[in-house]
Amino acid sequence: MVRDIIGLVLIGLGMFMILTAIVGVFKFRYVLNRMHASALCDTLGLLLVIAGLIVILGINAQSLKMMLITVFMWLASPVMSHLIARAEVMTHAHIKDECEEINQCQSK
Amino acid sequence: MPIQVIFEFLLIISLIICAVFALTSKRLLAAVVIYMAYSLVMTVIWVLLQSPDLAITEAAVGAGVTGILFAVTLKKIHALKGTKDE
Amino acid sequence: MASKKHSRFIDWVNGDTAEKVHEYKFIQKTVPPHSEQAHDEVISTRKARLFNISYEISAVLVCVILVAVLLFTVFNLPLFGSAGNPASNEVAERYLEKGLEETGAVNAVAGMILDYRAFDTFGESSVLFIAVGCVMILLMRDKNNISATEDSLEENERLIEIETNDPILQKIVLLIVPCIFLFGIYVILNGHLSPGGGFSGGAIMGAGLILFAVSFGIDAMQSFFSIKTFKAITTTALMCYATLKAYSFFMGANGLETGIPLGTPGAILSSGLILVLDICVGLIVACTMYGFYSLFARGDI
């Protein structure tokens, strides 16, 4: 009973994170800001939802598979964000107007 | 109404929305991304219909390989020009 | 990140900025066998005009008769979903009841598509093979007959790939691609025990090949997967499938023992030919997926 409640709370927190990410994607206007919001959904939201499911199920073969899903998503998703950001920085002609941090990075 | 039926209705409604917007989208890259979302929803529906064979294939082909092929083709025919964020 | 260094990549994304060179390095001039003037002369004679008119009328007539015959057949088919039609009474029950002891496959779907209806699957594999052949005919780059523009474009893309490769992506791909291949091989080898099989596992392995090709470039890919390997794998797998299933169907149709042990249901080495056929289909599908991507992206495998 206690385990169910803890699991449901964790799943609810994960759902809230995913909702935040969706609102952020529709609220922001620029690519890098949108990516900053949507990265929450793939990492923290997924981790919380799967942690809740593992707490409900207990340790068995299924929860081990879920842990593997988390590991692979945490490997793949940040790399995808990095690639999108890299392509945007490289191809945008007036990137310095959008964010000032680029200047400091390039001067180093 | 049991909660699974509500879930199935939500999935089917989102499937129809994805299909309509993939057809009517003005930008071709957006249409490809919506088509990939359609494939993901279809995967969940296949699992609910108890045919996991089709679900695995749909996830690998529909959401993965077909999207790559569409994107490569759009690049080759220079149709990605209007997608810059300006 | 200096913007001058990656200016070639920016041009590549924006398209149409590549300078056009209108010199042809190698030109093969072949005169078409029927020149236009001769064609016009043939048309203008009276006999030919008569033949053309009668040809069109007979084509329309053949189409109308074919449509009429097909519509007549459709109206005489049994109603969809009625209990008495042949699709829903004995065949489906037989597959579900006797499938396990006749094919030895725990997964009923695998037993159906690779044992009872194996020629259907053979047709699907052939369709994939023919599709890759057609894409090759349309998109394959001829090394001896290429204009200087295309040659410079190809060189440009190769330089872009070298300039923009990403060390983070390469490290992660080296971690992930073996896991993708392991999962694909697991899905193929367990096709007769659990959901999956040749098509799903082949698609997963093809996606892994595409990921490797995207992140490491053409040269690393061609060191172990060139067009020779592609041709060898696809033709060998297709021929293997055809030979095995032809033997099995020929013996079965004549009421003879095939001599293939079915094994205990549930073991990994069981269910006769299904495991071998799964491997064949998986190899064909994986090669097809990678071949499509490679031909679409750069006109070569």
Image: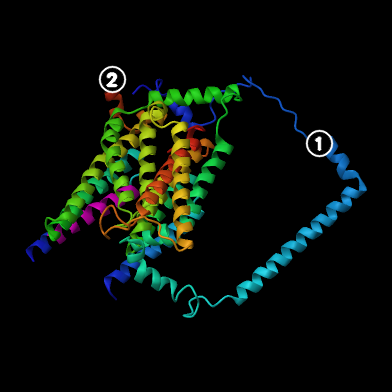
Left or right relative to C266: residue C164: right
Q: Amino acid at mark 2?
A: Ser
Judged from the image, the secondary structure of the residue bearing numbered disc 2 is helix
Would residue B31 be visible to someone looking at this image? no
Q: Is residue A35 above or below residue C228?
A: below
The answer to whether mark 1 and mark 2 are in CB contact below 8 A is no
Q: Is C291 positioned to the left or the right of A13 in the image?
A: right
Q: Magenta segment range?
A: A7-27
Instruction: Name the residue that disc number 2 marks.
Output: A107
Amino acid on which disc 1 is placed: Glu
Where in the figure is residue C142, as x and y percent of width and height? 57, 28
Please name the residue that numbered disc 1 is placed on. Answer: C36
Q: Measure the alpha-carbon separation of dots 1 and 2.
A: 66 Å
Q: Which chain is home to disc 2?
A: A
Q: Residue at x 53, y 22 (%)?
A: C152
Instruction: Give the percent coordinates (x, y) of residue C301.
Output: 47, 33
- Relative placement, left or right, of C158 versus A96 is right
